[in-house]
């Protein structure tokens, strides 16, 4: 679909999730808040990345 999850991606919102995404560390509260933002979960899944569980 045109636009899709990538169009809404704001990498700065996902930067706080880097250690959770890359190493499996427990996600921070800020990461969890950003993951709940529109399209964040879809963007991670589109990239083949695991969605941290908060």
Image: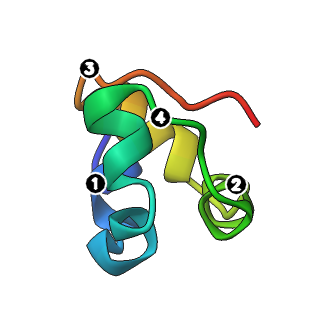
Residue 25's label in the rendered image is 4
Residue closest to the eye, 11 or 2 = 11
**Viewport quadrant of the N terminus:** top left
Residue closest to the eye, 44 or 39 = 44
From the viewer's perspective, is residue 10 above or below residue 18?
A: below
Determine whether the residue tagged by mark 1 lies in a helix, strand or loop: helix
Determine whether the residue tagged by mark 4 lies in a helix, strand or loop: loop
The extreme bottom residue here reads 12
Q: Name which residue lies at 47% across and 34% down.
A: 25
Q: Earlier in the sequence, mark 3 or mark 2?
A: 2
Q: Earlier in the sequence, mark 4 or mark 1?
A: 1
Q: Gap between marks 4 and 3, in whole Å? A: 18 Å
Q: Is residue 28 found left or right of 19 in the rendered image? A: right
Q: Name the residue carrying label 1.
A: 6
Label 1 neighbour load within 10 Å: few <14, some 14-19, many 20+: some
Q: Nearer the viewer, mark 3 or mark 2?
A: 2
Q: Name which residue lies at 45% across and 74% down.
A: 13
Q: Earlier in the sequence, mark 4 or mark 3?
A: 4
Determine whether the residue tagged by mark 2 lies in a helix, strand or loop: helix
Where does residue 54 sit, x and y in percent of width and height? 76, 37
> Mark 4–mark 2 contact, CB under 8 Å?
no
Determine whether the residue tagged by mark 3 lies in a helix, strand or loop: loop
Q: Gap between marks 3 and 1, in whole Å? A: 13 Å
Q: Earlier in the sequence, mark 1 or mark 2?
A: 1
């Amino acid at each position: 679909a045109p636009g899709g999850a990538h169009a809404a991606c704001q990498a700065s919102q996902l930067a706080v999730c880097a250690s959770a995404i890359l190493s499996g560390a427990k996600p921070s509260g800020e990461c969890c808040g950003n993951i709940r933002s529109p399209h964040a979960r879809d963007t991670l899944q589109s990239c083949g990345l695991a969605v941290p569980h908060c």
